[in-house]
Amino acid sequence: MKSSLIVLISVLIMALAISLTTVYRMDKEVSHVRNIIGEYGEQVELISAQRDTLALINAAFAARMDSVPSLRHTADSLRVCLDEVELVRNYLGYYLIIDTGQNRFHLRRGGLLVRTGYCGTGKGWAENDSGLVWNFSTPRGIRYVVKKGENPYWFRPDWYWLEQNLRPPRPGEDILIPDSLSWEEQIVYYRDSLTSSERVWVRAVPGALGNFKLDLGGGILLHYGVGRGRNVSHGCIRLGNSDLDAIYRALPVGAPVLIY
């Protein structure tokens, strides 16, 4: 009986020792895991802080990038104001101001506003599916009316087709409108006698520019067009029919046009 008790006590002591050892090992492992978690936590906090810093830097650069067009427009506007002050001193006729930011025109004489309204200006960079890129911005600065014309044709340049991922017509492939017709009859022929697929291949289009055009040089025209109040053109300045008529009659050849 006494020996059995001693054996039982010995077994209990061994079990207690094993339990204590196990608890000790588990405590060390838990402490190790806690240390690892603490280190990872510090790394996560550091990475998070770096991410937030990079996000702030990126936001700052984005804000600066977004402000560049506005700053440029402001600078161009101030330059035009100075140019206009000088112009008023030495020029007594009508002149035109084009605001490509607000897409508005201001017809003035001697610094006084005569007529104002919406216009359409260049849409900037454009790309087709083949990766060809064009800059269709309206050029800024002072330009002059180099020539004027009535009943103008729009002679489609090659980019008209390339922008639509089409091959420009080779000589003899474009569709011609009979030159025996009057200008008004040619407009009717273009609209009513040709299908939509045929109209695409007409290079000299009557009526597309309205009744008048004012040439500012370098392929930049003042002419009729849709999309006024927006940046939609390929660099030219689009006007409504009544505005175009008034500007055509007011501006002589040589008249200044200030664009900003």
Image (tube, rainbow, N blue to C red):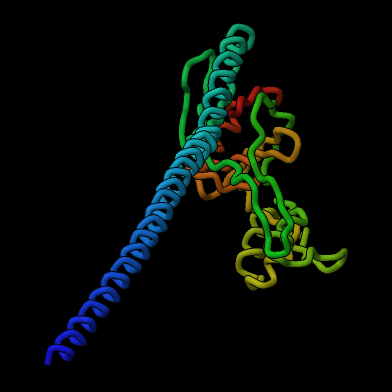
Q: Residue at x 52, y 34 (%)?
A: 64
Q: Is residue 5 left or right of residue 255?
A: left
Looking at the picture, tell me which residue is in the foreground, 104 or 80.
Answer: 80
Location of residue 180 by image quarter: bottom right
**In the figure, residue 97 lies in which quadrant?**
top right
**Residue at 42% of width from left, 55% of height from top?**
40
Q: Nearer the viewer, residue 54 or 233?
A: 54
Residue 231 or 151: which is nearer the viewer?
A: 231
In percent of width and height, residue 223 lies at 61, 42
- Residue 167: where, in percent of width, then height? 78, 66
Give the number of callouts: 0
Q: Position of residue 39 (x, y in %)?
A: 42, 52
Residue shown at the point (58%, 28%) measured from the top left: 260
Residue at 50 percent across and 44 percent down: it is 230
> Relative to residue 251, is residue 49 depicted above or below?
below
Residue at the outermost top position = 89
In this picture, residue 141 sits left or right of residue 17: right
Is 104 rendered above or below residue 24?
A: above
Q: Residue 170 or 57: which is nearer the viewer?
A: 57
Identify the image quadrant of residue 130.
bottom right
Q: Residue furthest left?
A: 1
Query: Is the N terminus in the top left, top right, bottom left or bottom right quadrant?
Result: bottom left
Q: Position of residue 17 (x, y in %)?
A: 27, 73
Whether residue 242 is visible, yes or no, is: no
Q: Hey, which residue is sitting farthest front in the picture?
A: 2
Q: Is residue 84 visible?
A: yes
Residue 16 lies left or right of residue 104; in this view the side is left
